[in-house]
Amino acid sequence: MNDDSDSSLESLVEEDPKVIRQKRLRIWKANLGVLWRVILGVVALFDFLSTVLPGMLRVKTEHAEDDHHHRHHHHHETDLLPEYRYEAFGHAIPTEPFGSMIDFLDDHSGHLGFAFSMLCFIEAFLDASRSRHRALMERDRKRLIRSQQKQNLDDSSDHPIDVIDDLAYLDDDHDTRTVFYCKLLLQLMLLPVGFWLACEALFLRGQVVLWGDSMEDGRLNMEELLDDEYDMDSLIGNVSHERDMNLSVGFALLRMLLEMLVDFLNVKGVVAKKKVMRKIVATVRKTVGGAVRHPLQFYRKAQSALTALRWIKYLQPILGNTNKLIGNLKDLAKKYRQRQEFLLMQKVRRKMFREMNTPQRREYAARKIQGLFRGNQARKHIRAVKLLRGNEEAMAALRLQAIFRRKLKEARARIKRRKKELKQLQAKAELDQEKKAENQSLRMNAQERLRLYQLEEEVNKESLRILQRRLLIKPDTRFAVTWRVIFCVCVVCEISMLVCNPLLKKYKDHSGNPLTVQNQVKEFLIPLPVSELKECSCEPHSRIGGWGDKLKHRFLHDEEPPHCDELPWYCLHPYSTARAWYSNALEFLIDEFLLVIGLVMFWDVPISFFTGDYDKDSGSLIPKHWFPRWVLPGLVLQFIVNPHMKATGKLVGRLFGKTFELGPVRVFRWNMGFFYPFFFVLLDLGERYIWIPLVKDQNRQTLLARASSTVMGKHRDLTESIQQLKVSAQKKKN
């Protein structure tokens, strides 16, 4: 489609008032969608807090459990409750206002869970509608592109485009409705069993009261329906536990199928189990028999195997960290050389300016301006002379430069124009889908819809490319070099600890514990407290000399008050306080040094991922290749060699255990409702206000330094050539 047709389409769309109203409606719908996500996230957060927080912070005593049971069934009797029922990190939480807030969440956990499930019920229909709309657009896009390809291959007007020109007809097709119902069924199966039972008892039978106590006519309270001590046999046959109330329908069906499969496999597994046990017993008998018949040979083999295991356990982390250190040292050396080059140029420039006085600086600035002007004029003259001479390579280069500049300007204008056109076509597509365009000339035809999909794909690719370019930091910036130095120091310290700790285990300290690198570093770096310094202590002078003084001191308890000389300056405030702070901070860093190394290695993963490299041909900043960026030494290796992966694995295991205790689908709904959107919002804020400004500033400083080093390098070469010419002229004159 040419530019004239694009401009005519744009003007046609702009003149339609319904399209303008539809654009405003799209903005209003987007804001309403954000508000809906906020409401869903807030309710999901409150449901999570009401489920996890009371049980996690409640005091683990029998009295507290009795109070919890009493409070759930007798809300009006609060005199017997203790003052503190919750604690965090060993400290009691006051009743007002935090304790009462936790009590409120605990009392209304059933209502919050029901409200969150109801919002998820509504979100299921909205999500299914969005999935249906995406499936509709994707199918229409594939049909249009396929028909366009056929038309280009045929190159004849006798074969019309085999597409559906009316989006309203596409709505009646069955495959998009299949997507809608499948997505809806999947979302509804994630809702808990208790939600459906509560809806059935509330809306169909009227046996549930949302607020207040149980009534005399036998109706139930919402809390009693979802309480862990309520007998569910009256509502469902085999569900009699509170966990089954929070179990999703899909997970309950899956568990039922798994139980049937396990019962079936238990019968078949008995035979296989007997065969495996028979082989294990035979192997054990063979090994034990060999050990009895040839004990020395068995002992040597066992010692060799144990020695090999010890060496593998000892050398594996050292070799891994050494390999990582070598790669980072090579990278650091390259960045160091790049940075030293323009630092040298800056030093030459500063030295030259320091040696100049004010008139010389003015003269230098004037010559610089004149040189720039003359250089510009000279380049124009050279370009004109080259054109007159007809040098094909020079003329081709000039033409390419002019074409590139013009294309760049046109591309920027085209991107802006296409973004505007895309918004207008999207508004017109929504108007057409909702059957609001009464004028048939304003209905979208196949070419317009194809143009819409092409613009969406082009704008998305361009936005992704621009975002990736803005996130890349240059490898020779001050931040990148400093971070690489810190990372190498941490790796060296980790290797030293891995090597020295096994060697120091055979030695004991004064308390009888094995020596470690941390203890040795702590003893070497941390100074003694001020209270333990002899020159900072004030002891009384004793007058007990002969037997008379001893009797007087024994019966009269006559002691002279302590008389101290003037204390040194480091024993007084604020130096003693600063000494104590320094000692505590250093002791914490030494004790938690592995934690510091783990944090540095953790943050090195995204920093290394977004550190670019210079292209060998063009010199532009490009991302690293796929393998070194993602695998070695990219994300995969960084996560494997992190020293805290063992602790991280234990933490993940505990989280999985807690997840299965609360219900995996329930935790999944909390994540989709609050935690995942909250995490991506934090990621977007950190990217927008921390990383991108840092990258922009560091890249700009490096660009200025490189430009300055280039200019000063040329100036230095010119000065040296002038000096050589003067020397040669002086020699000729002599």
Image (cartoon, rainbow, N blue to C red):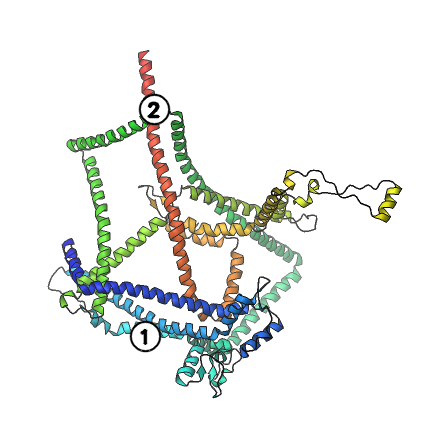
Type of the residue with mark 2: Pro
Near mark 2 (Cα within 10 A), the count class, few <14, some 14-19 or many ≥20, is: few
Residue, disc 1: 181
Position in image of residue 130 (x %, y %): 31, 68
Q: Residue at x 28, y 74 (%)?
A: 177
Type of the residue with mark 1: Tyr
Residue, disc 2: 359
Position in image of residue 733 (x %, y %): 31, 12
Residue situated furthest right in the rendering: 547
Q: Residue at x 29, y 64 (%)?
A: 28
Total numbered badges shown on the rendered structure:
2
Viewport quadrant of the N terminus: bottom left
| Element class at badge 2 | helix
| Element class at badge 1 | helix
661 vs 386: above or below: below
- Residue nearer the viewer, 558 or 628: 558
Viewport quadrant of the C terminus: top left
Position in image of residue 295 (x %, y %): 66, 59
